[in-house]
Amino acid sequence: MTGRLKILLVSLLHHSPTPLYAPFLLPHGDFQTARQLCFTLGRKAYWGSLELHHFPDAQAVVRTLSPDDAVICNRPHAAARAAGFFAEKFPGTAMYAVKANPSPELLQILWDNGISHYDVASIAEVRLVRGALADAKLCFMHPVKTAGAIREAYFTHGVKTFSLDTLEELAKIVTATTDAAGEPAQDLALLVRLRVSSEHSELSLAAKFGVDLVDAAELLQATRQHCDALGICFHVGSQAMTPFAYVQALERVRAAIAEAAVTVDIVDVGGGFPSIYPGLDPAPLEDYFQQIHRYFEMLPISYSAELWAEPGRALCAEYSSLIVKVEKRRGDELFINDGAYGALFDAAHVDWRFPVRVLEDDLSGTEQEFAFYGPTCDDADYMKGPFMLPADIQAGDYIEIGMIGAYGAAMATRFNGFGATQAFVVEDEPMASLYRGDRARKASDNVVSLR
Ligand SMILES: Cc1ncc(COP(=O)(O)O)c(C=O)c1O
């Protein structure tokens, strides 16, 4: 690219009133609007030029653009690799949990690499995925939905699969999918969500949803009357640090099936598959798959029963990193230009330690612990870390924060007008990967003992 063309592109990026890569950052469901906006403003050419805007790595982005705002770096090759891994190695159907990162670009990458099923949790996600991937199979896996959302999902978008955890929700689904002639739907796949422990996971999902084992038999029997395929699903909590989490949950599934004495057609082990972060280095995913398959095979289910999973984090954590600029240093606290209300929600709210590296060449090798303050005026915009960075880092220096593809930009608000509004493609490797095949295999002890 000539220098002049590059300057033109850069100045278009800087002076455009509309973030040109906006769909990534918009609330779910607004993607169509954003795409239409790009077309209506006649920006297709600009959009196109941005698509060409690849950089070797985050440091090249900084050297070329010296961005004042935080910038997202996307790695399509990393998401493609994760999707291919699940499509090939998970011993069943892996459906992507869209909430982890609803970027249409990412959805397309996952689809192109073998992910055909999508776990959607709201009608906005249903519309988004249906708009982006016309042939995808959508499963509405939120156990509490509005009747209107169920009706639109079923009659307009061809969604046949729903989860539930109460008799009330079952009645709602049955009514909302009954046609104008009063004929109930004959083609529903209904999955009863079972409450299971989150004790092996970093983020609990055990309190809000799921029928208790003692009430499961009645709900399974009632649900069986209204569906073509009956399933059981659960979620062991996000970032499950051992395959044993799934073993325990599948034992609970076994007890529920035995008590209800119903034919179960689908067992869905949910999300929870981990990624790698500082201090969180899980066993290889193959261990998870092996144990899940083994315990699934031992369930009292029909020979043709299907095994499903709903990975979110594991499919997209490696997809993105974030470039931030240090605006001020106060001792061991760095004031950066993204934070709790931007792509770093988890760093602030659940003290998630994302990996970091400095994007400067002239700093010392000695590292020390830092905490971050985000850009808004709110005291809660604080990330305690600790984040290890060169001791002589100062205002004006850039940092790359890795592994923010899951629950990163997806959680961002525009509070106070801050946050990343641009995204570029970079070609280097993510800061850590479960999929490169270069990790030392660490056996998961508490499962080995069950073998
Ligand atoms: C129903 C459901 N499925 C799947 C997921 C994805 O979980 P994870 O990102 O931990 O894989 C979630 C996350 O909240 C969820 O609620």
Image (cartoon, rainbow, N blue to C red):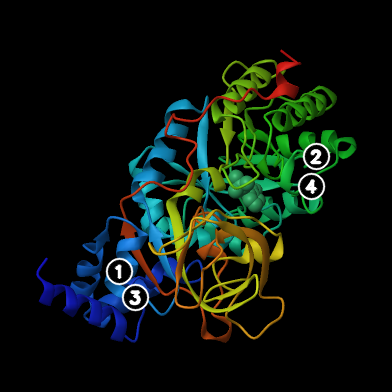
Decide if ligand 1 comes within 8 Å of the CB at mark 3.
no
**Other residues around mark 1 within 10 Å, as few (<14) / some (14–19) / many (≥20):** few
Q: Which amino acid type is shown beneath numbered disc 4?
A: Ala
Spatial separation of the CA atoms under disc 1 and disc 2 = 47 Å
Q: Position of residue 327 (x, y in %)?
A: 51, 80
Secondary structure beneath dot 4 equals: loop
Which labelled disc corresponds to residue 63?
Answer: 1
Q: Can you tell which of label 2 and label 3 is closer to the viewer?
A: 3
Q: Are marks 3 and 1 in contact (CB under 8 Å)?
A: yes
**Other residues around mark 3 within 10 Å, as few (<14) / some (14–19) / many (≥20):** some
Residue 115 in sight = no
Spatial separation of the CA atoms under disc 3 and disc 1 = 6 Å
Horizontal arrangement in the rendering, residue 37 relative to residue 352 (left or right): left
Q: Residue furthest right?
A: 214
Q: Position of residue 30 (x, y in %)?
A: 45, 71
Which labelled disc corresponds to residue 206?
Answer: 4
Q: Position of residue 389 (x, y in %)?
A: 55, 60
Q: Are marks 2 and 4 in contact (CB under 8 Å)?
A: yes
